[in-house]
Image: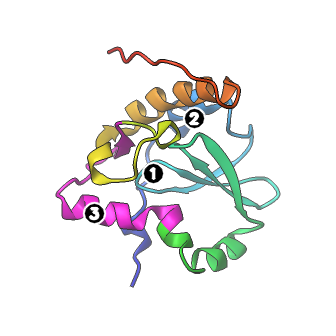
Amino acid sequence: MLELTDYTLDADGFDWSALLASWVWLLPTEFTLWFANRFGDLFIELEDGSVHKMDVGNGTLEKLADSRDAFSDAIDEEGNADHWLMIPLVDDLVDAGVTLGPGQCYSYLRLPVLGGDYDVANIRVASLEQHYDAIGPLQEKIKRLPDGAQGTFKATD
């Protein structure tokens, strides 16, 4: 039986406003954080009750359901739990001995939006702060580029 806690983060005790400061360009001004998967993707509820997923690896915000009840039904549909919670990849990481400590999540060496694969070789463990702070500004810059644009990124400390 699927245990949701095996694929989500313990979101309690963190200053989410500070953690998500570099994502204000994507997130609505008012929302309730419901939970986060182990890759730091957020599942949020808007004022109208709808549930959305902020996908860190692709820099997107997608509506998943009109309500929490509708989400609970939708996640049981074929493939949704695997996709939304990244169950197969989390299982592969755990099997490979890549586990998380408190305040950590899985992160990408190369973002999926830039061609990075969803596989163990492309994943690292990062603190939540590092994860959101590093990826948010990069995703914002990518979203500003016209479709088909090419660019070069230089990693610094």
Q: Can the viewer see residue 51?
A: yes
Q: Which mark is residue 17?
A: 2
Q: Position of residue 24 (x, y in %)?
A: 66, 31
Q: Residues within 10 Å of mark 3 (few under 14, many from 20)?
A: few
143 relative to 35 in the view: left or right: right
Q: Are marks 2 and 1 in contact (CB under 8 Å)?
A: no
Q: Nearer the viewer, mark 1 or mark 3?
A: 3
Q: Which mark is residue 92?
A: 3
| Between 85 and 68, the one nearer to me in the picture | 85
Identify the residue at image location x=42%, y=50%: 39
Q: In screen coordinates, is 122 left or right of 33?
A: left
From the viewer's perspective, is residue 40 above or below residue 71?
A: above
Q: Position of residue 13 (x, y in %)?
A: 43, 46
Can residue 21 be seen here? The reply is no
Q: Residue at x 65, y 30 (%)?
A: 148
Query: On the rendered image, what quadrant is the N terminus found in?
Result: bottom left
SS category of the residue bearing label 2? helix
Say whether residue 135 is magenta.
Answer: no
Cβ atoms under marks 2 and 3 closer than 8 Å: no
Q: Are marks 1 and 3 in contact (CB under 8 Å)?
A: no
**Circle 1 is placed at which residue position?**
12
Q: Amino acid at mark 1?
A: Asp
Span colored in magenta: 83-109
Q: Residue at 43% of width from left, 60% of height from top? A: 8
Query: Residue 24 vs residue 115: left or right?
Result: right
Lower sequence index among marks 2 and 3:
2
User: Is 94 contained in the magenta span?
Assistant: yes
Residue shown at 20% from the left, 65% from the top: 95
Q: Secondary structure at mark 3?
A: helix
